Structures are given as C-alpha cells and as structure tokens.
Image: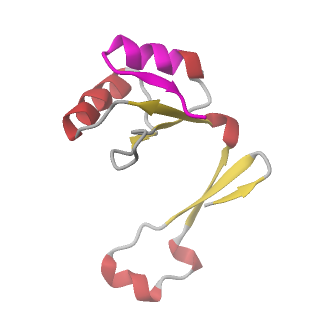
Amino acid sequence: MRSCGEHLIWYLKPLRNDQCRSAGPENFTIMDIPKAHILLFKTNIRTEGDKRYIGKIMEEHRIDQWTVDLQDIDCVLRIVSSEWKLDEVIQLVVKNGYHCEILT
C-alpha cells in the first residue's frame, strides 16, 4: 500500500504459497481507493464471536468491504464505502451493542 495524494493504492496478491517465488507484476491487482472512502473506527469488537456478529450486521446493510483488527489495541473497524458516512456507521455499531468512535 502507498499513499498518492488523496488516494491509497492497494496491491493485492492472490497467490498460493508455491507461487510466491515466481510472483511477477501479472500476479498483482491494483486498487485505487480514495482516502475519503476509507472509514476508520476505534471499537470494542474484541472476539471472533463479536466479529462474526458485526459481520452479519454489515451483510444485512450491504457493507461488503470491512475488517476488524482484533490484534490492535483499538480493535480497529475499517470500512471502504463511498455511500456510508462516519456518523451512520457509529450509530449502526452502537445500536448493536458495541462502542464505536472515529479513530483519530
């Protein structure tokens, strides 16, 4: 990943372990994501069970690109969306029993 002005460029590697040694440019997909579409939150989504529950909520609301970093002390929820606003995500997460605030 690298920053390029108002965009983040993500390099994805859809490779199996046995392909790693011979990986060339043809094995990479480039995603150009505007920074404004990446929403970051501090949460208390701490366990795999919490993550599965939130996953069902995300699915119900058609939020396809999301992750929760359970290893991070802030349990960071990351959503890529051009449609959802920060306050809407906070309301959705809080309504379902979790703490959620903008990650600063």
**In the picture shown, does residue 89 fall above or below 74?**
above
Residue at 29% in and 36% down: 46
Q: Quadrant of the C terminus?
A: top right
Which residue occupies the extreme bottom position in the image? Answer: 21
Q: Quadrant of the N terminus?
A: bottom right
**In the picture shown, does residue 74 fall above or below 2?**
above
Q: List x then y, in percent, for residue 94.
A: 39, 15
Left or right placement of residue 84 versus residue 21 in this view? right
- The quarter of the displayed image where residue 34 is located: top right
Q: Nearer the viewer, residue 75 or 89?
A: 75
Q: Nearer the viewer, residue 51 or 65?
A: 51
- By what rule are the colours in the image chosen? secondary structure
Residue at 40% in and 43% down: 73
Q: List x then y, in percent, for residue 15.
A: 39, 72
Residue at 24% in and 34% down: 52
Left or right placement of residue 92 versus residue 85 in this view? left
Magenta extent: 88-104
Q: List x then y, in percent, for residue 50.
A: 25, 31
Which residue occupies the extreme left position in the image? Answer: 49
Q: List x then y, in percent, for residue 22.
A: 45, 88
Q: Nearer the viewer, residue 43 or 18?
A: 43
Residue at 42% in and 88% down: 21
Left or right placement of residue 50 versus residue 73 in this view? left
In the image, is residue 71 part of the stretch drawn in magenta? Answer: no
